[in-house]
Image: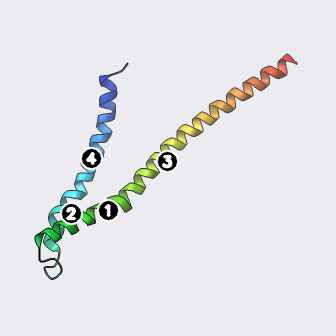
Amino acid sequence: SKGLLNFYSGFTPSAIRVALKQIYRWPLMIILPKTLPDLYFKNEHFKKLFTGFCIANIESFIICPLERIKVWIITKRELDLNLQTKLKQQQHQHQHLLLLQ
C-alpha cells in the first residue's frame, strides 16, 4: 500500500551498507597486490587471486558474524514483543474466566 515509500525506506540502509563495504574493499583491492612480495607471487594472476581470497576471508570471518548478530538482535526484539502480547492476551483471558466464575 505504501509502494514507493517502502522502496526508499529500504533503499537507504541498503545503500549505506554497500557503500561501507566498498570503503574497505577498494583499498584492499588496490594496495594488497602492490604490497605482496614478488618472491611468493611472481605471477600477477596469483596476486589477484590471493587478494580476492583475503577479501573473502574478511567477509566470511568478520562481516558475516556481525550481520548475524544484527539479525539476531532484530528477531529477538520481535520475539520479545510477540511474547509480551501473547502473555497480555492470556492474562486478559484468564481474568475474564475468573470474572465469569
Left-right relation of 59 to 25: right
- Answer few, some or many: residues within 10 Å of disc 3's Cα (few below 14, many 20 plus, some between 14 and 19): few
Q: What label does residue 18 carry, if any?
A: 4
Q: Measuring 59% from the left and 39% from the top, which residue is drawn there?
A: 80
**Label 3: which residue?**
72
The percent coordinates of residue 74 (x first, y second) are 48, 42
**Label 1: which residue?**
58
Mark 4 or mark 1: which comes first in sequence?
4
Q: CA distance from mark 4 to mark 2?
A: 16 Å
Task: Name above or below for residue 99 compared with residue 20.
Answer: above
Describe the element under mark 3 as helix, strand or loop: helix
Quarter holding residue 31? bottom left
Mark 4 or mark 2: which comes first in sequence?
4
- Answer few, some or many: residues within 10 Å of disc 2's Cα (few below 14, many 20 plus, some between 14 and 19): some
Q: Amino acid at mark 2?
A: Leu
The percent coordinates of residue 64 (x first, y second) are 38, 55
Q: What label does residue 71 carry, if any?
A: none
Q: CA distance from mark 4 to mark 1?
A: 15 Å
Q: CA distance from mark 2 to mark 3?
A: 29 Å
Mark 1 or mark 2: which comes first in sequence?
2
Left-right relation of 55 to 100: left
Q: Measuring 34% from the left and 27% from the top, which residue is drawn there?
A: 6
Q: Measuring 49% from the left and 47% from the top, which residue is drawn there?
A: 72
Left-right relation of 51 to 72: left
**Label 2: which residue?**
28
The percent coordinates of residue 7 (x first, y second) are 31, 29
Q: CA distance from mark 1 to mark 3?
A: 21 Å
